[in-house]
Image: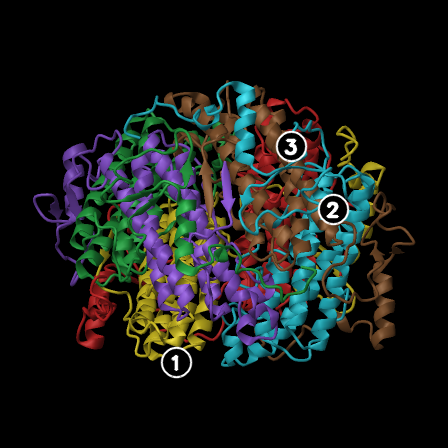
Chain colours: A red, B yellow, C cyan, D brown, E purple, F green
Amino acid sequence: MFLHKSILVHDVRVQNPDPVFAEKLLEQYGGATGELTAALTYLTQSYHTENAGIRDMLQDIGTEELGHLEVIALLVEQHTNKASANLRDKAYQSTLFAIRGPGPHLVDSKGLTWDARYVNEGGHTVRDLRANIAAEAGALNTYEQLIAMTTDDGTREALRHLATREVSHTHMFMEALKTLNGLDQPMFGDLKPDDTVNLYFNMSSGPGADERGPWNREPAFQYIADPLQHEMQTSKGRAGNEMAPAEPHLDRSRASSR
Amino acid sequence: MFLHKSILVHDVRVQNPDPVFAEKLLEQYGGATGELTAALTYLTQSYHTENAGIRDMLQDIGTEELGHLEVIALLVEQHTNKASANLRDKAYQSTLFAIRGPGPHLVDSKGLTWDARYVNEGGHTVRDLRANIAAEAGALNTYEQLIAMTTDDGTREALRHLATREVSHTHMFMEALKTLNGLDQPMFGDLKPDDTVNLYFNMSSGPGADERGPWNREPAFQYIADPLQHEMQTSKGRAGNEMAPAEPHLDRSRASSR
Amino acid sequence: MFLHKSILVHDVRVQNPDPVFAEKLLEQYGGATGELTAALTYLTQSYHTENAGIRDMLQDIGTEELGHLEVIALLVEQHTNKASANLRDKAYQSTLFAIRGPGPHLVDSKGLTWDARYVNEGGHTVRDLRANIAAEAGALNTYEQLIAMTTDDGTREALRHLATREVSHTHMFMEALKTLNGLDQPMFGDLKPDDTVNLYFNMSSGPGADERGPWNREPAFQYIADPLQHEMQTSKGRAGNEMAPAEPHLDRSRASSR
Amino acid sequence: MFLHKSILVHDVRVQNPDPVFAEKLLEQYGGATGELTAALTYLTQSYHTENAGIRDMLQDIGTEELGHLEVIALLVEQHTNKASANLRDKAYQSTLFAIRGPGPHLVDSKGLTWDARYVNEGGHTVRDLRANIAAEAGALNTYEQLIAMTTDDGTREALRHLATREVSHTHMFMEALKTLNGLDQPMFGDLKPDDTVNLYFNMSSGPGADERGPWNREPAFQYIADPLQHEMQTSKGRAGNEMAPAEPHLDRSRASSR
Amino acid sequence: MFLHKSILVHDVRVQNPDPVFAEKLLEQYGGATGELTAALTYLTQSYHTENAGIRDMLQDIGTEELGHLEVIALLVEQHTNKASANLRDKAYQSTLFAIRGPGPHLVDSKGLTWDARYVNEGGHTVRDLRANIAAEAGALNTYEQLIAMTTDDGTREALRHLATREVSHTHMFMEALKTLNGLDQPMFGDLKPDDTVNLYFNMSSGPGADERGPWNREPAFQYIADPLQHEMQTSKGRAGNEMAPAEPHLDRSRASSR
Amino acid sequence: MFLHKSILVHDVRVQNPDPVFAEKLLEQYGGATGELTAALTYLTQSYHTENAGIRDMLQDIGTEELGHLEVIALLVEQHTNKASANLRDKAYQSTLFAIRGPGPHLVDSKGLTWDARYVNEGGHTVRDLRANIAAEAGALNTYEQLIAMTTDDGTREALRHLATREVSHTHMFMEALKTLNGLDQPMFGDLKPDDTVNLYFNMSSGPGADERGPWNREPAFQYIADPLQHEMQTSKGRAGNEMAPAEPHLDRSRASSR
């Protein structure tokens, strides 16, 4: 059961309403990196998480994000409400609020509707927590851009709080992931990897495209400089017919006209 | 520039074609966790990445994923092509291939079209790499489920290879993230967090909903057992009027009938 | 601010888990007529509603719907969780849970992701309340179908409660709409209708297609049996050139090849 | 069978072409509240409506809406066609017409494609008619905003006609709904409501969030001021264990690492 | 203006209702290759077409397609209506009609909503007509598959008629395209092609991937067997620095941490 | 297997970065007519094409389009990268890059995400090739508009090359289609057309709406001036009851309240 309290998680005090900025703020109401994505992702995940502690954490954070969504909503409302009184206002007319009314709408800053394709969840808690760290990173990045785009102090303070909490949540997810050994160990689940697990394939080559770094260096990785050559040798050793893989999709049994 | 070679990154040898399983395989061709998501995410990211090493890594891996997409495509083709010869086949008729033709289509296992909302990228390399670790986790999880659902050895071998490479890529992304201090440090970018950064808000309470763990324990976190109480006290100290935050969205200037 | 309590708005006690039915239940988790549509519609509306009483009602009901969403979530979880233990279970394998894991996902019963295009809101409270009555009607209708499709008593009881509440909410919205004179008066807003406002155009004609009823009968309506004839006469009187309306979209100034 | 006649349902005479306004007009061509939504909703509904009179009404109105779609199309064409002759025109260049060509496109004012998720229909005529009243309210609201945004008399006259007809259709749908007892009676269909049907749950509380009105007042409604308390008492009387509802989603049978 | 007549363009007489087949038929109601795509594409195109003859043709065919949409609608209705009387019918329950009601819905055979992304139009009549020939080819192909999947004679006859008309329309579009010199001449519009216009780049190479045919044979085409080599030589001659193209996206001016 | 080479298929040298133009360029990165649509369409088609020559051609061209996508990506990067250094730049702030970061994103010029609904493929090679000719026409048309909108020489040269290649590909597809007899013959596949195949129905009539041309002229076509009359006579001769087709969707077996 959810309850709503008429106390905001942070003050919303817009001094200089700006409907054009409000349109950009929609990115965090109905956009990919917004609070709705966060809230629905964590709550949905919680319903299949068996670990009681992590389930509770997901519901704590998911519920907090609903309160963040409300803060964004009221920021948008304050940036558009007064402006809407003057329907001939040029800036207001240039925004989607002129047609759709003041206040928030479930779209991003370009008018694209929120869609659950933004939600990454399911099947395994390690996967869910990694998804959450990624989601928070997107949210934090967007908040940074938005803060840079407004000079209204009330707006900046509110956004700074929301951005701060993304950092807090990231920290929590990282701690939880550590308990599952998932923060710095690539593997999870039951897969038995094959013998290519430590190979790095240099698929992109040419000037400026053969860089080396910890992500492709020995001893963690074996660098395959010429993957085509490697694959031809491997398949030869394996099957005696290195070209076979290229052709089995041919089937002449269908109608000849095709 | 891209080149295509008629050598597959892994053998595709389906012994027992099964169009119903092929429909499920579409999850990795045109689904959220599929190879197309991976390829387009990494390549798109590479075009704004300034770090030359990481940019090259993204292009190496993104290009490899295009080869994985091809492996899925040929698996689907082999699972549907022969079946399609017998249009009255019951199992084949139950799949979308009966109407749309054999071979892969850019949809997931339920027929939903691939959409770029699946792609998480932009603005900062730490954000991109975290997104990639999440993407790989989804892919790995899906591959595990798919492997469990088929008994065809050729299919299982190919899927095992693709799943293995998701582990490899996760490893690479983790190593790259370490060089940016982003694997286990929550913060990145220029934000100055406010003083709530270490608070844990217990927004979900009641029996079985007040669990404690490393994600909300001192000294890393300060646990706020009653966030409503906390917020009321905080706002009182701050502004002398604790209820203010709940109301500023009221604007009586619009038509009274609304 | 939202709070979550570990008390459900209704018991969730599934006796006979049925993953195939769970897939249908997703219609009310991530489908067009589901609880998420209701919750997000009412909460979003509340942020632009100036009438304090109606705003509060929208937040009361919107918050209740979040609790309903949770009930659906747990129903889906219980219908899929045990089934998922046996990955070779035929029925389970036929559902999307086999690939995406047990528990709810933000899609409808056919796997289509939830999208904010389902949300109807903005600009005027009469419009919002009419939208809500329509939304509740869809939800009620879906619940009736779902109840008819399961014999599990625990599931039926929970769904009956959720359906009942849709009736309750409809009642509330109707009462609120009455206070704005919007329940049985077609007009709202500032439009000055033109003189066609009481005309009924019989655009569909022929045997069985010229029915009469209160919706096209005098004195409320004037029935125009032959709208083409009517339009030709009207435009003649008006402009002296009855055919003009058909052609003004011709503009020969672009390239002749087009 | 449909026939098309080269007579418009209303004159289209644009004196001052304005491609920026034309882009906004797309809201009624390919947008949520537009004529396409109306036409396809009513026609689709008619194909499952058994009541002969209402079916005919839906086809009459649905067909009229196709004629309205055409009026919007020609308005857009006239606002963009001449402008397109001067490709260097700044205002024209800022619109989507510069890339996609003059004339209407099946998108809304922000370039989002029309999608059938906008269509609310199915299962019951009461549900359909309520959906239609909601659809017309959205359309009327959008037309009002559009009329306020242009000073071109020809455009305003045409839009006023289309808006007027939305009022007319609303009136018709209301009359039809009365014949099914659906305009002011919340219930329809076969549901047996449970004993909560008249309860109003005050889920949102705190200063300014406990308003009373006809929608939550006795005798029609019983006001539950503290729903959490109410639910705990209710579940206690019912099962002897008030906390049970919070936990049944726990299933420890899956892998412990999850 | 559109008129509707209660005469169908073809008899609809289903003898053996089959809701599972009806679900597949939705492909032509709300699917990519369906009648709605055709109708809306041609009508939308007509509103920007300046050639009076072709504009009229588009409106003739677009209007005919609306009548086809109706035929599909009634086929679906007849295949589902009687079945719906028995809600416990297993086959009916497996379809989306069980939840959404009998009759057509604006989705494809997998439940994906129709979206205007299916519509290809704009900017030039040659482009539009080519799009239409492609659209008709998809429709024809789908009809063929559907006819192969049913044994109901009434259904087959109706589908055969609709498929036939796709051939007719293709013929008409081809004739119209000939008048614009667009059927077999690749070029249209104002582009001045560069000197690569006749080159064929052999981007895919290896065993079984270097086929020759009229599409890459002299004298129409010059076959570039090794495009990488070709590009390196070309860029060398042009700028004195063949590697430059790979790097200009580097800009070190942003924060070094990225 | 795909390989990536750090050589571009065409120089990318932007002299005057313009983020507003870059936003328009996204139309060819993640838009309907863009390079991603082309690449994924041709590659996906290749996996079900049995004709070895055409399959290879599809892979040659599909791979080339991946290289074109890269050229668009780098154009967007160069147009936005430097601009992004000055976050207060007004023009930059008006674009989606301000929030989402410099470089390309998988959306069109209006911010709509790329979706596989743009891809037309499946079932028959004639259908695929016709789809491709249509896709190329859209791409060419968009390039022409984009070239007209910029004065940057480096950008114009690169776009001219990409546009040129669309002409080249069109030429190749036409040649391939000729080998299947599909360029100027409407029919393909196994359909036995009914006797309406040569009829032209004049569904749109009235002043200016009865044009004649090669697409409706004898001897290729028989012109039916009054299709309603024609249909009534046809159905009379056929069944003795000309009105039957209008009614069979009536089924009174469902609940009378509907």
Report which residue position mark 3 lands on.
D164
Q: Is residue D89 above or below residue A35?
A: above
Identify the subunit bearing mark 2. A
Q: Is residue B247 above or below residue E80?
A: above
Residue B184, horizontal then vertical, whole percent: 54, 57
Q: Nearer the viewer, mark 3 or mark 1?
A: 3
Residue at 38% of width from left, 62% of height from top?
E157
Residue at 49% of width from left, 70% of height from top?
E18
For the residues labelled 3 and 2, say whether their Cβ atoms are less than 8 Å apart. no
Report which residue position mark 1 lands on.
B151
Q: Which mark is residue A254?
A: none
Amino acid carrying label 2: it is Val
Element class at badge 1: loop
Report which residue position mark 2 lands on.
A9
Q: Is residue E108 toward the left or the right of residue D118 in the image?
A: left
Residue at 44% of width from left, 76% of height from top?
B149
Residue D8, horizontal then vertical, whole percent: 50, 31
